[in-house]
Amino acid sequence: MGEMGDIGTTVLLLLAHIALAAAGPSVIIVGAGFSGISAAKTLSDAGITDILILEATDHIGGRIHKTNFAGINVEMGANWVEGVNGDQMNPIWTMANELKLRNFYSDFENLSSNTYKQGGGLYKNSEVQEVIDLSDSVHTDGESLSTSLPSSGRSDISVLTMQRLKDHVPSTPLEMVVDYYNYDYEFAEPPRVTSLQNTVPLATFANFGEDVYFVADQRGYESVVYHVAHQFLRTSRTGAIVDPRLKLNKLVRHISQSRSGVVVTTEDGSVYKADYVMVSVSIGVLQTKLITFEPALPQWKILALYQFDMAVYTKIFLKFPHKFWPEGNGTEFFLYASERRGYYPVWQQFEKQYPGANVLLVTVTDEESRRIEQQPDSETKAEAMEVLRSMFGKNIPEATDILVPRWWSDRFYKGTFSNWPIGVNRYEYDQIRAPVGRVYFTGEHTSEHYNGYVHGAYLAGIDSANMMIKCIKTGFCKVTIKDKET
């Protein structure tokens, strides 16, 4: 009787599995950023079409988002296709070309002629070039050191530690702004916290090429996200997404799971049920209590998530009645060397991208970003104007408008992109990416080689979806995490 009962149970479970496979599993995707959209398309391509995408904001694209500023559309977040003209093709570059997005090669080669002193005036070209050459030499030595370390990451050091080993710790205003340009401008955090092994050399540039292209299309960089979304979501004749499987303004606050499935609850009290859930929110959001999990995420998962960094990269746009800065070849980017490291350091003018707009962009990161987010825009404008007057003289016109994104303060994002800090090794990073039961995770922070980048977000969505597909279709749901020491 016992044996027959076991056989009967097995048959029932098998029939249930067959019925589920025939109907197709249901999946809820939390977040319609690039990773969420990419994951949803990958699931759809595999025949898993019973999906529901819940997005907290009123648009898809997440941190790839345009806004109108002084009559032109500018990018609040991601702006460049990074990693072009290498041995491998960056998938985002392919999309940008298919869509014919207006883009411009970013040439940073002439920074030695465009670096300004805090007290006014330009540094001599030769003086700046000497500092740049030394920094590049130390960086190259750092690459050799990085590749010699065990792949597990257990012996990883910070970029600053590497610099100390090479007897090069930037300390003068000029040295600090060159150092900032080399590291903070890329990773949004300083060398003292950034992992050497996971950023030097950088897979994005090693694999896809060292060139970067600035997207300045009035349709917005988000066009690449819509391009992917349109391939599986129903649209109107005008191109608007009308598919009921995408629900905007639905902020997920609670996710519970059991052996029978998942239940997702949004802030407005709506409840949705499915077989699986894919969480694509930023790691910054996962480090807050915006979304609660039942049962709570295991300790290994929480520790891994909390150890990674969500950096803040702030692009401040300023509008002027007329130009007062140099234009022409070799003048697009310029640096301000302050005694206060990271104080309004990297500037960009847009004679090619936005002709006639009279707009400048200055980038700040990390603690300066957090400080600026907490003060009125009028104070930020006053600070920026003081820096510009130091560079170009007291008679320059006052900025008529300013745009200050506040990614860190936004509870839907809590920052701009992830940065790999010292202390997180390959083992812990695999834990960040690993599913917990029926709850899967994706986002640029889960990209194995390209965290922090647009292509990382896109590829992470595919990778995470394939993990889920393998579990659904083969029943093999275990994710292998490499040993700590290997």
Image (cartoon, grey):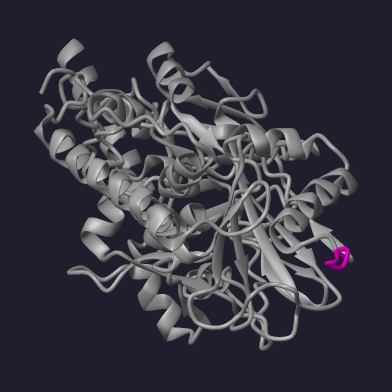
In-front residue for pair 155/277: 155
Give the answer, above or below, for where 367 lies relative to 416. above
Tell me if residue 61 can be seen.
Answer: no
Between 62 and 405, the one nearer to me in the picture: 405
Residue 223 position in % (x across, y down)? 56, 74
Q: Is residue 62 above or below residue 267?
A: below
Residue at (67% x, 81% y) in the render: 354
Magenta region, main secondary structure? loop
Let me know if residue 398 is in the magenta part.
yes
Query: Considering only vertical position in the picture, is 18 above or below 236?
Result: above
Residue 27 x %, y %? 48, 47
| Location of residue 218 in the rendering, given as x and y in whole percent from the top left corner | 66, 80
Q: Position of residue 188 (x, y in %)?
A: 51, 42
- Position of the C terminus, as image quadrant, is top left
Is residue 420 shown to the viewer in this render? yes
- Identify the residue at horizontal 70%, vertical 67% (top origin): 360
Residue 408 forms part of the magenta stretch: no
Q: Nearer the viewer, residue 462 or 109?
A: 109
Q: Specify start and end residues of the magenta stretch as a single range.
A: 395-399
Q: Quadrant of residue 322?
A: bottom right
